[in-house]
Image (cartoon, rainbow, N blue to C red):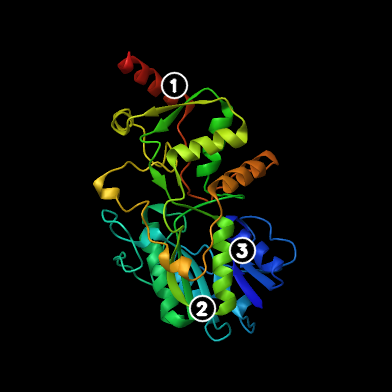
Amino acid sequence: MRLLVIGGTSFVGRTIVGDALGRGHRVTTFNRGLTGKDVEGVEALRGDRSTDDGVRELAGRSFDAVVDPGGVVPIHVARTAQALAGSAPFYAFVSTTGVYQKWDTAPVDESTATWPADPDQDGDPGDFQNLRVHKRGCELAIERSYGPGASLIARAGSIVGPHDNLGQLPWWLTRVAAGGRLIAPGDPGRGLQLIDVRDLSAFVLDQVEAQAGGTYNAVPAGTNTTMGGLVDECLRVTGSAAGPVWMDEGFLLGQGVMPWAHLPLWIPDAPETAGFWAVSGAAAKAAGLRTRPFGETVADTWEWLRSGGSVQAAPGTPPFGLAPEQEKQVLAAWDAQAG
């Protein structure tokens, strides 16, 4: 197939490009040439879809499908879809489960209410505060140009794996490898639902090859590890003798430790987040999504880091992780109240 991949130089896009080339497809990438190097073997086009002039490089070209793994500004995605609707019959978009409004009921499935959004909304690609609404606007922009039968909306959950540009699993691996006592949040049995970027890529390309439209939660069909499993796998692959100290969530919150930001992938177990790690992946599984063991993802991510890989965060992405000085203070406070 002749595939056009928007972006294609970091994490999800990079993985999709490599996978597509490995399947024998001819891949053209379209990007500004600023985020990273294009994967060897692609035809690289330069352009900026934030303006009408920026997409002129696509004029007169035809493709079997478009894969858009990173669009975040609705009007940019709308401009891309409009420019290609007559020359590429299928459009695949990687969205996010963040488009759902409420997380207090489990399971969250594809029929759960989404945020109201405008497919022509402009904005800053680095505006992560409004990412959920903007991603929904991107979905609407694609559906307007392509319709549900000729478009794939893959709503990914938390994505992990090699070439990570978010930094959540890499933070845990790096912190565990450093050794010593480390803070572990809440119940070690708290389930997590994480998808390997390579499994997400395979699902998207399978649907593209079949020209199969639809909207799917691209997540494992159920929790595929736990907070304890995350820490244990990091200990296993790094060979670290670090000692996790499992702390009560209320205590951590009282110490100013912020869920997700300070301790990546930690979401407190509360009624308002009952559905956060309970997203239904049944439809995607029925459509062919296959997920690998979580331990394989951890091992491969650690190998990538050890071989010189580093997190190249997108502009505006907030940093993850608890500062060492704050960690020491929280550990000291925990010891004091326990004694």
Q: Of the residues under marks 1 and 3, which one precedes in the sequence?
A: 3
The foreground one among 130 and 160 is 160
Measure how far apart labels 2 and 3 are at the Cα level: 17 Å
Query: Helix, strand, or loop for circle 2?
Result: loop
For the residues carrying marks 1 and 2, which lies nearer the camera in this image? 2
* Disc 2: CA contacts within 10 A as few (<14), some (14-19) or many (>=20): some
Identify the residue position indicated by label 3 in the image.
Answer: 16
Label 2 belongs to which residue? 212
Q: Is residue 54 something that shows in the picture?
A: no
Front position among marks 2 and 3: 2
The reply, left or right, for residue 196 in relation to residue 128 is right
Taking 53 as reference, is 137 left or right? left
Image spot of residue 239 (x, y percent):
62, 30
| Residue nearer the viewer, 78 or 233 | 233
Residue 138 visible in image: yes
* Quarter of the image where one finds residue 252: top left
Figure quadrant of residue 112: bottom left
First in sequence: mark 2 vs mark 3: 3
Where does residue 65 sit, x and y in percent of width and height?
A: 58, 78
Residue 40 in the image, given as x and y percentages of width and height: 74, 62
The correct choice, above or below, for 39 with respect to 268 in the image is: below
Q: Is residue 71 above or below residue 308?
A: below
Instruction: Of the two numbered discs 1 and 2 on the same chain, state the one appearing first in sequence.
Output: 2
Q: Which residue has dot 1 on it?
A: 328
Q: CA distance from mark 1 to mark 2?
A: 52 Å
Residue 66 in the image: above or below residue 109: below
Name the residue nearer the viewer: 236 or 303: 236
Number of callouts: 3
Type of the residue with mark 2: Ala
Q: Amino acid at mark 3?
A: Ile
Residue furthest to the bottom: 86
